[in-house]
């Protein structure tokens, strides 16, 4: 516990870079500090303490970190600056040399942040606490709060795969998790706090159970019984870990939504071997076909990296052909960037930067076409939408069970409610679809919604 008599600085602001897992952990850090008496404020409100949770996935990690630090100091030059997260774990020495930084915390230390804050006096040289993450077997639970509607629940951390292009095992350590019982209790806590939908997140969630002698299937069976939650979603899960038993369970479930996100990374078996992925394109295709057979209306998102070392013209065309033929809903396209200390640097063939951009553009266009077609097949059908409670410029959003994103003028009668609506037509100009709201819920019938990341 912190001795609050040591100081008077009480406001704290947060900035999160990277994935949903990082957002989940930032939210948990915020709750812990609020329990210690700190007051959370917006980033631009001139906080006494700024916490920057970093990412290491892209080559711009250091640039984004430095920019955010400078932004915080422009807002309050006397602010106490804490930098944590994956980049802090991998490159603490780089952060120490950044002007204005007072405390650097590694991946596991960040969830014990209150313990490390001390007197909050500005330091000439940043204090560093970043342990050997490879040997650290602790699992730190977390779930996002602030949005009562949808909560990201961390169910797993770390990875044992060591794919040649990836730094995540170096930044987050080996695969580990809490027990099913402990994770189920976390879900109950989130539900009791007001969450109506939980998204399971982690580094490699399908690997859940390795450290407790359980399985991911055990976990989702346990979560299905949580009365406090109405909807559950599985975030990114490796195709070799997405078993037919899991797909069948989701298909029969009353709470798990028909929504999958599966990393492919490459549609070339040769490149998958260079990446040291644990599946081939035949298995990936089979997983997609199994989902479509059991859940014809499911949203299927797919991760793909383009321009990776070893991706020849032939390999890229194989990727484009595979993705073009699969009945998927959307692509998350990542342009490859070389990361220090990864095995991919030993692969001889490097794709020129301009060619990487060209290939990325082709796959983004393919994704937009597939997303448009996915949405259009639901014109003039009914769907249940969970509306979020916050508004942006007078607009509120929501999602159908199969992840069609809804956007409409804010109305408090819809906030944090599941409402059955009528989907109308997808506009070729705005990318929005008109919908009808039952008259007994709200007087005005015509609202609009738009697919996330859809460019028409």
Image (tube, helix red, strand yellow):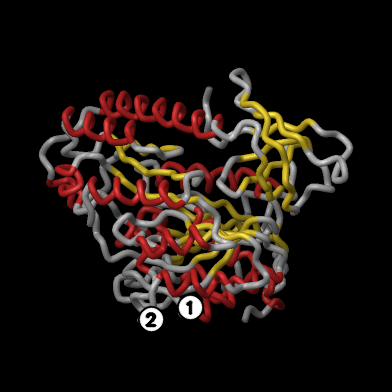
- Residue at label 2? 212
Label 1 and label 2: CA atoms lie apart by 9 Å
Residue 32 locus on image (x, y percent): 62, 71
- Residue at label 1? 180
As drawn, the residue found furthest toward the front would be 293
Residue at position x 57%, y 60% in the image: 232
Q: Secondary structure at mark 2?
A: loop
**Occupied quadrant, residue 409:** top right
Please report contact status of discs 1 and 2: CB closer than 8 Å, yes or no: yes
Residue 389 locus on image (x, y percent): 75, 50
Q: Secondary structure at mark 1?
A: helix
- 354 horizontally vs 296: left or right: left
> Which of these two is toward me, 18 or 192?
192
Residue at position x 70%, y 29% in the image: 434
Marked residue nearer the N-terminal end (1 or 2): 1
Does residue 438 appear anywhere in the picture?
A: yes
> Which of these two is toward me, 179 or 230?
230
């Amino acid at each position: 516990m912190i001795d609050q008599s040591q100081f008077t600085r009480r406001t704290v602001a947060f900035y999160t870079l990277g994935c949903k897992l990082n957002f989940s952990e930032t939210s948990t850090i915020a709750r812990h500090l609020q329990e210690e008496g700190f007051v959370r404020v917006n980033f631009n409100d001139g906080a006494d303490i700024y916490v920057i949770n970093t990412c290491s996935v892209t080559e711009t990690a250091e640039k984004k970190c430095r920019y955010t630090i400078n932004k915080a100091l422009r807002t309050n030059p006397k602010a106490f600056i804490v930098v944590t997260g994956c980049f802090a774990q991998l490159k603490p020495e780089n952060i120490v040399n950044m002007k204005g930084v007072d405390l650097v915390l590694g991946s596991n230390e960040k969830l014990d942040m209150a313990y490390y804050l001390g007197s909050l006096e500005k330091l000439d040289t940043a204090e560093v606490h970043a342990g050997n993450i490879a040997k650290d077997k602790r699992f730190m639970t977390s779930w996002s709060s602030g949005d009562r509607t949808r909560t990201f629940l961390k169910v797993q951390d770390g990875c044992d795969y060591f794919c040649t292009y990836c730094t995540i095992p170096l930044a987050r350590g080996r695969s580990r998790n809490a027990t099913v019982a402990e994770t189920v209790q976390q879900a109950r806590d989130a539900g009791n706090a007001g969450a109506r939908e939980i998204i399971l997140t982690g580094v490699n969630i399908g690997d859940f159970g390795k450290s407790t002698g359980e399985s991911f299937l055990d976990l989702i069976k346990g979560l299905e019984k949580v009365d406090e939650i109405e909807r559950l979603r599985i975030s990114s899960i490796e195709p070799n870990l997405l078993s037919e038993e899991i797909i069948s369970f989701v298909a029969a479930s009353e709470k798990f939504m028909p929504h999958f996100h599966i990393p492919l990374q490459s549609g070339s078996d040769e490149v998958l071997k260079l990446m040291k992925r644990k599946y081939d394109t035949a298995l990936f295709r089979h997983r997609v076909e199994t989902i479509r057979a059991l859940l014809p209306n499911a949203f299927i998102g797919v991760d793909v990296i383009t321009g990776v070392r070893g991706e020849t013209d032939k390999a890229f065309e194989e990727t484009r052909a595979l993705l073009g033929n699969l009945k998927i809903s959307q692509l998350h396209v990542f342009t490859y960037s070389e990361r220090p200390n990864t095995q991919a640097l030993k692969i001889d063939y490097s794709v020129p930067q301009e060619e990487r951009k060209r290939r990325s553009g082709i796959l983004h266009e393919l994704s937009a076409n597939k997303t448009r077609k996915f949405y259009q097949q639901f014109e003039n059908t009914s769907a249940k939408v969970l509306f979020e409670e916050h508004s942006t410029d007078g607009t509120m959003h929501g999602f159908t069970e199969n992840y069609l994103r809804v956007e409409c003028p804010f109305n408090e009668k819809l906030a944090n409610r599941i409402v059955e609506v009528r989907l109308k037509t997808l506009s070729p100009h705005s990318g929005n679809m008109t919908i009808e709201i039952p008259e007994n819920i709200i007087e005005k019938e015509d609202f609009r919604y738009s697919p996330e990341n859809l460019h028409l």
